[in-house]
Amino acid sequence: MSDDKKPFTRPKVPDGHAFHVITRQKEIKPGQFFVGYETTWEPHQKEVPYTTPKRP
């Protein structure tokens, strides 16, 4: 048997989708212990442009 050991590589994690939140794994750099994640929040409320009220 050969004793060739492959270096440890982190597996690619799929995107996580939850209510108004998406998390993605950052790019994997070889030899780095912590990979990190990027979190994207979707807006909960719709933003409406301001209009001045009618004058009485």
Image (cartoon, helix red, strand yellow):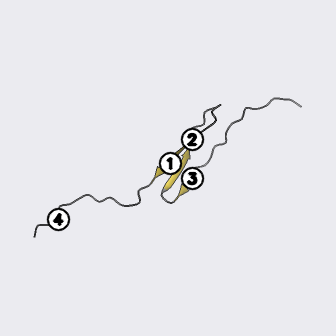
- Which residue is painted at 44% across and 55% down in the image? 42
Amino acid type assigned to the residue bearing label 3 in the image: Gly
The residue under label 4 is 53
Of the image marks 2 and 3, the number of the one nearer the N terminus? 3
Examine the rendered structure and indicate whether residue 49 appears above or below residue 35.
Answer: below
Q: Quadrant of residue 12?
A: top right
User: What is the distance, in whole Å, between disc 3 and disc 4 at their CAs?
Assistant: 43 Å
Q: Which mark is residue 16?
A: 3
The residue under label 1 is 39
User: What is the distance, in whole Å, between disc 2 and disc 3 at their CAs?
Assistant: 14 Å
Location of the N terminus by quadrant is top right
The residue under label 2 is 36
Of the image marks 3 and 1, the number of the one nearer the N terminus? 3
Examine the rendered structure and indicate whether residue 30 appears above or below residue 46.
Answer: above
- Callout 2: helix, strand or loop? loop
Q: Which mark is residue 51?
A: none
User: What is the distance, in whole Å, between disc 4 and disc 1 at their CAs?
Assistant: 38 Å
User: What is the distance, in whole Å, between disc 1 and disc 2 at their CAs?
Assistant: 10 Å
Quick check: marks 1 and 2 in contact, CB under 8 Å?
Answer: no
- Which residue is painted at 86% across and 29% down in the image? 2
User: What is the distance, in whole Å, between disc 2 and disc 4 at their CAs?
Assistant: 47 Å
Amino acid type assigned to the residue bearing label 4 in the image: Pro
Closest to the observer, 2 or 18: 18
- Callout 3: helix, strand or loop? strand
Give x and y (percent) for residue 10.
67, 39
Location of the C terminus by quadrant is bottom left
Instruction: Say which of marks 2 and 3 sits in front.
Output: 2
- Local packing at callout 3 (Cα closer than 10 Å; few below 14, some 14-19, many 20+) is few
- Local packing at callout 2 (Cα closer than 10 Å; few below 14, some 14-19, many 20+) is few
